[in-house]
Image (cartoon, helix red, strand yellow):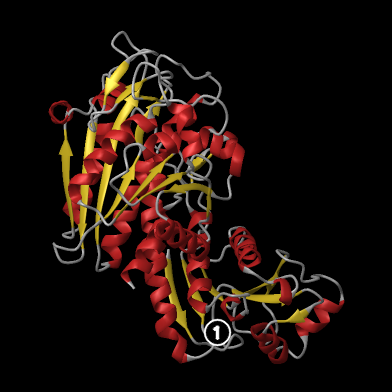
């Protein structure tokens, strides 16, 4: 998909399709007014007949509008102007792409960037439109026998700007959006792969491929024997039931001086989670291929960094393994020693993500990072708490929380903070080891983070529980590419 910026007159613009807005009450947007004047009031007469009211998300496709150069004009309802906020703009943009997909248009000119969105600028409008367009057009058909039905697919969109002075700002939005989309697509592709393809070894190969493609990225793969030497008893405990060897994947994006402390991203990489001996129910177990979406997010974010060439350093750490039952698998009640020296009583082998992250977070200390953010599909409890609009956020650093909240709002990839009070810590105490890997009582999303907090006392750290945001379940099961937009925005803010 190609995106361009132009300053054009809609009535003279040759295109497969022009996209213009109509406000509730049938008032015309600036671009629609120009079309109406050029066509001797064609839109005014049409709207008087009641074909379109302007309600948010309504669409009406016009063919060969009089005295207009474009083949088609797509009218889009924008709702009430005073209520036209970020959520309304995003909803409207989704409806636009859905309508365009039903046409034969290969390219379109988008005049919706002319609309005033409450508290948002041109840069935001273009970036969001590109992300939404790419998301709507994304298809994962790698394992389909019939990959296309011959339908013409939209492959180019031009965004109009009201004056030539805005072109530089708009061009920057296109660059950022393309990088984010590339990162999201890698993240989605990896998440959507079946677990018999996307193994820990496969994830490691993707990291090495990134390093080959981008000079700014280096990759190092640590093997089981390396983990044994470092005393990563928690990570190895999860891997014991699988015939697939675990990997600890370490990526460096080098965009600043070597002495500049990096931002560390740690992604949970359980390429399939059966629950181990604490076996999950059979229903929807196939969705546990998505349990490596944290790892995929780290890879996608590093790709975006390389595309943007940001002047910062980022280290990505990915503990990758399967969690399967077997004769050698870890059993409930087993006690293991982590890399930090703390011992863990494994009450439930299905609480495995926190175990592999514990050793990965301890390993991350060696890089002396400025901050550490872990990304994990960690608990079903976060879905109960927040649903799918927001990722759960817990942290020991209020400044980091503020920065992530700001980035979430700016990218429309939002987070919601949950408490990390000491009151919850006693729920993960064990009477036979230092820690239990599951908490007693309620607040499971919080006690899971409390477990990780025991391994991050030396770090400025935030935990993102993305179990509700990284993938869709059910009939439409698919990775979403989140929270790549959030993390890229956070890193863009740092770079500025």
Task: Count the marks.
Answer: 1
* Farthest residue, direction right: 49
433 vs 123: above or below: above
Residue beneath the point at 31% across and 8% down = 327
Where is residue 252 shown, x and y percent of the image? Answer: 20, 53
In this picture, residue 19 sits left or right of residue 363? right
Q: Which quarter of the rendering shows the N terminus? A: bottom left
369 vs 128: above or below: above
Residue 90, quarter of the rendered image: bottom right
Residue beneath the point at 28% across and 36% down = 319
Where is residue 273 shown, x and y percent of the image? Answer: 41, 26
403 vs 65: above or below: above
Where is residue 32 shown, x and y percent of the image? Answer: 68, 83
Q: Name the residue under label 1.
A: 13
Which of 477 and 317 lies nearest the eye of the viewer? 317
Where is residue 71 shown, x and y percent of the image? Answer: 61, 75
SS at badge 1: loop
Which of 94 and 42 lies nearest the eye of the viewer? 94
Residue 199 seen from this side: no
């Amino acid at each position: 998909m190609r995106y361009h910026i132009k300053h054009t007159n809609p009535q003279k613009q040759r295109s497969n399709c022009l996209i213009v807005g109509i406000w509730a009450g049938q008032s015309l947007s600036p671009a629609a007014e120009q079309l109406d004047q050029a066509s001797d009031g064609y839109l005014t007469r049409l709207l008087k007949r009641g074909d379109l009211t302007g309600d948010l998300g309504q669409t009406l496709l016009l063919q060969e509008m009089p005295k207009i150069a474009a083949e088609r004009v797509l009218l889009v309802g924008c709702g009430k102007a005073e209520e036209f906020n970020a959520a309304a703009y995003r909803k409207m943009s989704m409806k636009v792409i859905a309508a365009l997909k039903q046409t034969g248009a290969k390219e379109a000119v988008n005049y919706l960037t002319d609309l005033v969105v409450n508290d948002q600028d041109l840069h935001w409008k273009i970036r969001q439109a590109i992300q939404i367009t790419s998301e709507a057009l994304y298809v994962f058909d790698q394992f389909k026998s019939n990959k296309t039905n011959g339908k013409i697919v939209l492959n180019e969109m031009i965004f109009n700007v009201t004056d030539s002075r805005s072109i530089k700002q708009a061009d920057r939005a296109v660059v950022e959006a393309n990088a984010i989309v590339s990162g999201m697509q890698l993240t989605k592709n990896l998440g959507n792969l079946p677990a018999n393809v996307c193994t820990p070894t496969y994830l490691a190969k993707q990291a090495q491929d990134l390093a080959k493609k981008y000079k700014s990225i280096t990759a190092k793969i640590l093997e089981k024997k390396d983990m044994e030497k470092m005393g990563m008893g928690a990570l190895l405990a999860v891997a014991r039931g699988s015939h697939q060897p675990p990997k600890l994947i370490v990526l460096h994006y080098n965009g600043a001086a070597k002495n500049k402390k990096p931002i560390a991203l740690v992604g949970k990489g359980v390429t399939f989670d059966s629950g181990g001996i604490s076996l999950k129910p059979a229903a929807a177990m196939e969705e546990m291929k998505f349990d490596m979406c944290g790892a995929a997010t780290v890879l996608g974010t590093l790709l975006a960094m390389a595309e943007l060439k940001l002047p910062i350093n980022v280290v990505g750490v990915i503990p990758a393994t399967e969690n399967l039952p077997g004769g050698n698998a870890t059993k409930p009640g087993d006690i293991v020693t982590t890399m930090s020296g703390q011992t863990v009583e494994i009450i439930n082998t299905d609480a495995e993500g926190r175990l592999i992250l514990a050793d990965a977070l301890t390993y991350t200390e060696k890089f002396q990072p400025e901050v550490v953010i872990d990304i994990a599909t960690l608990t079903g409890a976060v879905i109960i708490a927040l649903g799918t609009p927001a990722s759960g956020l817990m942290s020991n650093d209020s400044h980091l929380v503020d920065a992530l909240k700001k980035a979430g709002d700016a990218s429309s990839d939002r987070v919601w903070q949950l408490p990390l009070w000491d009151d919850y810590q006693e729920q993960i105490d064990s009477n036979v080891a230092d820690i239990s890997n599951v908490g007693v009582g309620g607040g499971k999303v919080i006690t899971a983070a409390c477990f990780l907090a025991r391994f991050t006392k030396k770090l400025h750290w935030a935990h993102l529980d993305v179990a509700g945001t990284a993938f869709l379940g059910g009939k439409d099961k698919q990775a979403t590419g989140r929270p790549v937009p959030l993390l890229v925005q956070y890193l863009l803010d740092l770079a500025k």
